[in-house]
């Protein structure tokens, strides 16, 4: 057939698009009727080409109806582009149609099939009008179903967000709902969208927290190995080390399985792969026979893993596009510094030179600076301020131990103080994480 021609200029009606495939060689009474008498009868027939161009032709002419003469397989392939929801009614006219063909075509969005038999123009117009009515009804039902699904989806997000906020802020369900509703009104958003944002923020905060724990665990595992080598609470250190190995693997499994709402990120996936490789090297070193050399080798691998974990957490913080999560990351990093300081105290007696002492002093300065920033941060509440005061006191005891002459008793006291301080910042990180959820709503 020739190329399609546009509707008559100045005619505001949507045309009926007639597509006759070059594969269709049958002598057809209805085809002849539409081509010869249709335009004069007001059907606005546009003679067309192959079904392969159906999507492009519909986009060009914006018809309210498409009438097709083509083999079933060709029409099915054309309809597949719309994934079951073509933008207008589609009618198929053929000499015969198998039930299986009609079932597949109906699922692909076909509005109706009519046998290619002689009938008056009025009858054909009525048949095609019926297809348009059916398509309109199906479209309306599909819209109602979509709206219902959207409401159910919003309700699901709302219920999850209410539960999250109730747990995070000690709120009742009614108070959590009022908080979400107020946020939705303030932002001019649907409450379902606000609820989804709160849940997604919580997922980002949780994942950032877990990734940040890898930094702490890299240092803690070496500190525990050094503690065992020094003969300080050997049994307790061995148990904690075994738990730490399991915890690292659980975190890596979570990070590998987690995909944010907007999809995976190739750069973060590559960084995570390097983190996994770094952990494999550290785990192997920790499994060696305990000696000064094996602990030092483990420390080298731990510091390499620390740098990789820092890179991963920085990428997660940036990708979240949620500024309050910086406080979660900053507080979580304090856990690592408590372990690194205690590790350096123990390793300073194993390795010659002042490298570990210098590192210990640098980490202590970083810890103090971050603690001051947390104390001054606006993202706070009474519970956080009380926890910070406890952490400040515990930090004072650890810092005093660092300045005291090192003896087995002092080193054990520092190791235990680092555990207490680690627990305090674990709690604080969780408090900040929950507070972020409140702030995001």
Image (spheres, rainbow, N blue to C red):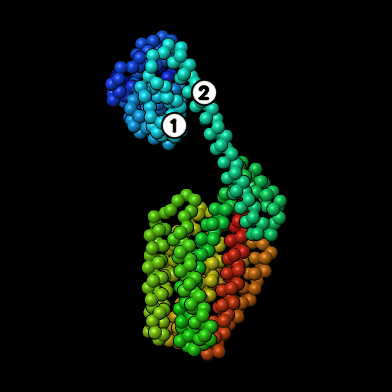
User: Residue at coordinates 49% horizontally, 58% vertically from top-left?
Assistant: 317
Q: Nearer the viewer, residue 343 or 259?
A: 259
Dot label at residue 133: 2
Q: Which mark is residue 238?
A: none
41 displayed left or right of 411: left
Relative to 22, does residue 316 appear above or below in the rendering? below
The answer to whether any part of residue 323 appears in the image is no
Seen from the viewer's position, the closer of residues 325 and 402 is 325
Q: Residue at x 58, y 61 (%)?
A: 433
Q: Of marks 2 and 1, which one's residue comes earlier in the chain?
A: 1
Residue 140 lies in quadrant: top right
Q: Position of residue 228 (x, y in %)?
A: 48, 85
In the image, 401 versus 250, the foreground residue is: 250
For label 1, the SS is helix
Q: Could you say where residue 223 lies in the image, as x and y percent from the top left?
A: 48, 80
* Vertical arrangement, residue 171 with respect to residue 278, above or below: above
Q: Is residue 163 left or right of residue 358?
A: right
In the rendered image, is residue 247 in sight?
yes
**Tag of residue 106:** 1
Q: Quadrant of the N terminus?
A: top left
- Above or below for 167 versus 342: above
SS at badge 2: helix
**Nearer to us: label 2 or label 1:** 1
Q: Position of residue 109 (x, y in %)?
A: 44, 31
Residue 286: percent from the left, percent from the top?
A: 41, 79
In the image, taking residue 382 as reference, residue 74 lies left or right, namely left
Q: CA distance from mark 2 to mark 1?
A: 15 Å
Count the marks: 2
């Amino acid at each position: 057939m020739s190329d399609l021609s546009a509707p008559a200029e100045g005619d505001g009606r949507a045309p009926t698009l007639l597509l006759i495939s070059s594969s269709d060689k049958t002598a057809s009474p209805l085809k002849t009727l539409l081509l010869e008498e249709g335009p004069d009868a007001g059907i606005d027939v546009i003679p067309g080409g192959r079904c392969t161009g159906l999507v492009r032709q519909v986009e060009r002419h914006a018809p309210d109806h498409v009438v097709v003469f083509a083999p079933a397989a060709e029409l099915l392939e054309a309809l597949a582009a719309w994934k079951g929801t073509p933008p207008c009614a589609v009618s198929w006219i053929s000499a015969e149609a198998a039930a299986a063909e009609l079932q597949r075509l109906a699922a692909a969005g076909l509005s109706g099939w009519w046998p290619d038999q002689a009938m008056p123009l009025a009858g054909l117009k009525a048949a095609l009008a019926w297809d348009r009515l059916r398509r309109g009804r199906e479209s309306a039902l599909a819209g109602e179903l979509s709206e219902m699904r959207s409401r159910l989806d919003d309700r699901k997000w709302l219920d999850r967000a209410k539960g999250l906020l109730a747990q995070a802020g000690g709120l009742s369900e009614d108070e959590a709902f009022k908080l979400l509703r107020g946020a939705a009104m303030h932002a001019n958003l649907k409450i379902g969208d606000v609820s989804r944002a709160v849940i997604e923020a919580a997922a980002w905060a949780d994942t950032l927290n877990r990734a940040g724990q890898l930094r702490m665990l890299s240092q803690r595992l070496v500190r525990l190995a050094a503690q065992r080598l020094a003969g300080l609470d050997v049994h307790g250190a061995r148990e904690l080390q075994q738990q730490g190995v399991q915890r690292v693997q659980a975190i890596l499994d979570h990070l590998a399985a987690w995909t944010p709402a907007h999809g995976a990120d190739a750069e973060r996936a590559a960084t995570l792969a390097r983190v996994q490789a770094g952990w494999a090297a550290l785990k192997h070193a920790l499994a060696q026979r305990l000696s000064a050399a094996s602990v030092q080798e483990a420390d080298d691998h731990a510091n390499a893993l620390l740098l990789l974990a820092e890179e991963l957490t920085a990428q997660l913080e940036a990708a979240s596009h949620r500024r309050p999560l910086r406080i979660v990351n900053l507080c979580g990093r304090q856990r690592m510094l408590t372990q690194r300081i205690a590790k350096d105290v123990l390793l300073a007696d194993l390795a010659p030179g002042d490298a570990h002492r210098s590192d210990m002093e640098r980490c202590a300065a970083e810890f103090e600076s971050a603690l001051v920033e947390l104390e001054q941060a606006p993202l706070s509440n009474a519970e956080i301020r009380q926890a910070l005061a406890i952490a400040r006191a515990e930090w004072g005891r650890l810092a005093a131990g660092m300045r005291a002459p090192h003896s087995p008793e002092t080193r054990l006291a520092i190791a235990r103080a680092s555990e207490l301080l680690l627990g305090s910042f674990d709690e604080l990180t969780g408090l900040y994480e929950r507070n972020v959820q409140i702030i995001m709503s």
